[in-house]
Amino acid sequence: MKLDDRIADLAGPVAEAVGLMVDSVTVSAAGKHTRVLVTVDLPEDAVGSADLDTVAAASRAIGDALDAADVPSGTYLLEVSTPGTDRPLTLRRHFLRARTRLVTLELAAGDAVTGRLTEVTDTDLVLDQDGKAATIALADVQVGHVQVELKRID
């Protein structure tokens, strides 16, 4: 089993215990040490962002689990983070987490569509575009991006 998969297996249950899920694990060399980046997020059915206290609790729990299993062996640097607004939206679960956010979708046809993501079904995304619903097939989306809003109107 690859090291990143082993780390994900160890980190998953302890992240879930504090209300988060492991989104990804990246292992890389950092000089004489190993750098382990664990990206955590709220469950896909949640709306909002993980708070700092919850991420810190996940970091402590993940570190304890890795130390107990001696994975990775030797000295390592553990970083636990959330995906951030610059994560490309490529999977259905990414879009689920982006509900209520303003997104731009790059379509396979070459054009782009912007709107507030209001709903995600098994096959479609529903955007609010100035009060009108637009349904876009997930299969037609190459990638989506969350647009940063400095002042959001609710």
Image (spheres, rainbow, N blue to C red):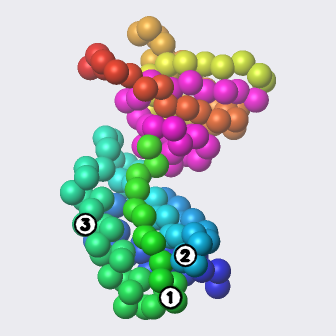
Residue 116 vertical placement versus 23 (above, below): above
Are the residues tagged 1 and 2 within 8 Å (C-beta)?
yes
Q: Is residue 90 visible?
A: yes
- The residue identified by callout 2 is 34
Tell me, for residue 74, which label it has, or none.
1
The range drawn in magenta is 85-108
Sequence order check, earlier mark of 2 and 3 = 2
The residue carrying pointer 2 sits among few (fewer than 14), some (14 to 19) or many (20 or more) residues within 10 Å by Cα, namely some
What secondary structure is marked by label 2? strand
Q: Report the amino acid beneath label 1.
A: Gly
- The residue identified by callout 3 is 57
Are the residues tagged 2 and 3 within 8 Å (C-beta)?
no
Q: Report the amino acid beneath label 3.
A: Ala
Front residue of 151 and 27: 27
What secondary structure is marked by label 3? helix
The x and y percentages for residue 21 are 40, 62
Q: Report the amino acid beneath label 2.
A: Thr
Quadrant location of the N terminus in the rendered image: bottom right
Residue 2 vertical placement versus 85 (above, below): below
Q: Is residue 91 left or right of residue 84?
A: right
Instruction: Determine the CA span between mark 1 and mark 3.
Output: 23 Å
The residue carrying pointer 3 sits among few (fewer than 14), some (14 to 19) or many (20 or more) residues within 10 Å by Cα, namely some
The x and y percentages for residue 22 are 44, 64
Sequence order check, earlier mark of 1 and 3 = 3
Instruction: Determine the CA span between mark 1 and mark 2.
Output: 8 Å
Sequence order check, earlier mark of 1 and 2 = 2
Residue at 44 percent across and 80 percent down: it is 10
The x and y percentages for residue 118 are 42, 28
Residue at 30 percent across and 75 percent down: it is 61
Q: Is residue 26 magenta?
A: no
Instruction: Determine the CA span between mark 2 and mark 3.
Output: 22 Å
Front residue of 129 and 25: 25
